[in-house]
Amino acid sequence: MMDGSVGSSAAADLSKADLEASKRLILRWDSTATSAGERMLFDGGDRSDGESYLRAFDDIRRSIKEPGAAGSPRRSSSSGNVIQTAMVRLEDEFRNLLLTRATEIDVEAFVDLSSLSMSSASGEGINGLSDVEGGGDASGESESVSGSSRIRRSSIGSMKSIREIDLLPADALDDLRSIAERMIDAGYDRECIQVYAGVRKAAVDACLRKLGVEKLSIGEVQRLEWDALEANIRRWIRAARICVRIVFASERLLCERIFEGLGISDDTSFTETVKGAAIQLFGFAEAISIGRRSPEKLFKIIDLHDTISDLLPDVGAVFQSKSSESIYTQAAEILSRLAEAIRGILSEFENAVLRDPPKTPVPGGTIHPLTRYVMNYINLISDYKPTLMKLIVTRPSASARLSSDDFAAAGSAPLELDFPESENQTPLSTHLTWIIVVLQHNLENKAALYKDNALSHLFLMNNIHYIVHKVKGSSELREMIGDDYLRKLTGKFRLSATSYQRATWVKILHCLRDEGIHVSGSFSSGVSKSTLRERFKSFNASFDEAHKTQASWFVPDTQLREELRISISERLLPAYRAFLGRFRQHIESGRHPELYIKYTVEDLEMALSDFFEGFNPSQHNRRRSH
């Protein structure tokens, strides 16, 4: 296509005959004429007609700029009318080139690129989005993705994460630039930009629809059910990366190739093309950032925060002009609000754990749902450590920790909690430790709901053991909580186990004491049989009750359950064996010994295997028999 030479003087002035010939050529391609309207000058085929048309246009423009070449003022006026006709034609050609020669962006081909250059040190996020470094060979070019679409490394700064697509072939770009140059020179820059933005905006909007970005108001986003909102956030994260790094970046490149250096102020064509789509895209994240805060939203909001944080340099590179910098400002403000929302949600979560009211005790003293929820939650928090370490910069204050209102809401009186603070702990670590402290306090309130003191201790043992197990199971969480506090937790778990055994078995073992059994007298064997019979009866009744009750209690951790049985066995069986050995003959020498010696040592050992299984002994025996 012709080089831009609009306005340059020819070596010799145009002849009147040449000027008239140029006008006739322009009028022959009048778009209002049916025969001319059926064909396009720039159709990607024979280029001679298009080149001749632009030469004729340049001749007429030169005649207007240099009146000596045009002759009389009447002819100059006639030339102006012809230019208007040419503008209509060139506008149609410009639109047709954009519509027919553009390469459609196949967004599905870029699924693997949707996680480009995640700079967070956290690695895979909760959604499994993997880090991908900028690929390609040493020349900066990579293989074709789809059709004639070609990925090239960004020329914008050093943003390696951006991938620009050539949206039109080189010959079409040359034609578009040649037309734009003449329209702008003739004062039709507004019309040129309107045509360009109208066509390309529709293409950008189509990409957003394919990526699942819906047009939702802030109110509509905030009214979505959580499942729907979560799905929308996942789609948005993928869409945002593709839009910023591929779609918007490619549109900017296209604008530069067509309009750069043609005298248009700033990058109006690019701004008018993508600003609406960018506002729609970031409007969703803005709605999330100012929405209701609740604990279940934390991790998706962190994902949103990390995505925008990672994209922000690219947003700044793509939207770098004055006319489009408001997009960068919007994204930066959303990032700040998301950070504040994350801090607020963590605080809300701490309060929710503290305020969770004691209601009805969980059956069998098993692990409370709150314990599972809180420990799984803070395990996930530890997975997001790199981000949260940057955002959580203050420790929970003493006044906030020990608010009378909070304890009143939780159904308990204010008291000083055992909260081990260390100067070496980061603010995030302090918050996680505080959450566990608050959880323990809440569990103690819930333990008080049990009427059986032994079951209350078993409940605390189960729950604190679960806390310890979860902390030990995560290297990140263990590092943040610290071994000193972990040892304290382990000590509390062991204390609860010991307290359970005392509450249950001290009374039972008390039946096996020698005290009060031995008597003196010439007609006595030295043993009070009535007292001995009473001791055996008391032991049998106490053990029967414990067996019946505690078989329905539940210790869900199999290793802990077995260790607890072994600990009980090591105290009970030797004591019973010794008692039976010392006094068995005194019972068997009397009447109906079976009424008093109900258990052998082996019977007790078998019965202990029923304990903490979570169902009554008859059910358990049936299960074992099958």
Image: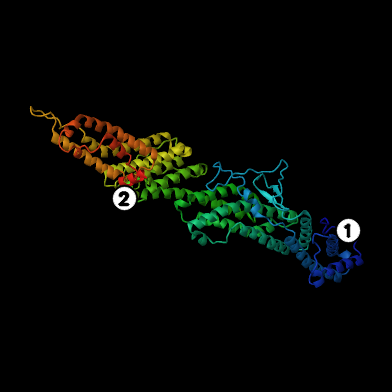
In-front residue for pair 552/338: 552
- For residue 142, side relative to residue 574 (left or right): right
Look at the numbered disc 1 and give the secondary structure of its residue. loop
- Which is more foreground, mark 1 or mark 2? 2
In-front residue for pair 367/591: 591
Q: Quadrant of residue 499?
A: top left
User: Which residue has dot 1 on it?
Assistant: 10
- x%, y% of residue 525? 12, 28
Q: Residue drawn 90% across and 61% down?
A: 13
- For residue 299, side relative to residue 583 (left or right): right
Look at the numbered disc 2 and give the secondary structure of its residue. loop
Q: Earlier in the sequence, mark 1 or mark 2?
A: 1
Query: Crowdedness of circle 2 by 10 Å Cα count: few (<14), some, many (20+)?
Result: some
User: Which residue has dot 2 on it?
Assistant: 411
Q: Residue drawn 65% across and 56% down?
A: 323
- Is 579 above or below relative to 289? above
Residue pushed farthest left?
Answer: 522
Question: Which quarter shows the C terminus?
Answer: top left
Instruction: Kindly identify which numbered label has been placed on residue 101.
Output: none
**Any part of residue 30 in sight:** no
Query: Crowdedness of circle 1 by 10 Å Cα count: few (<14), some, many (20+)?
Result: few
- x%, y% of residue 279? 59, 58
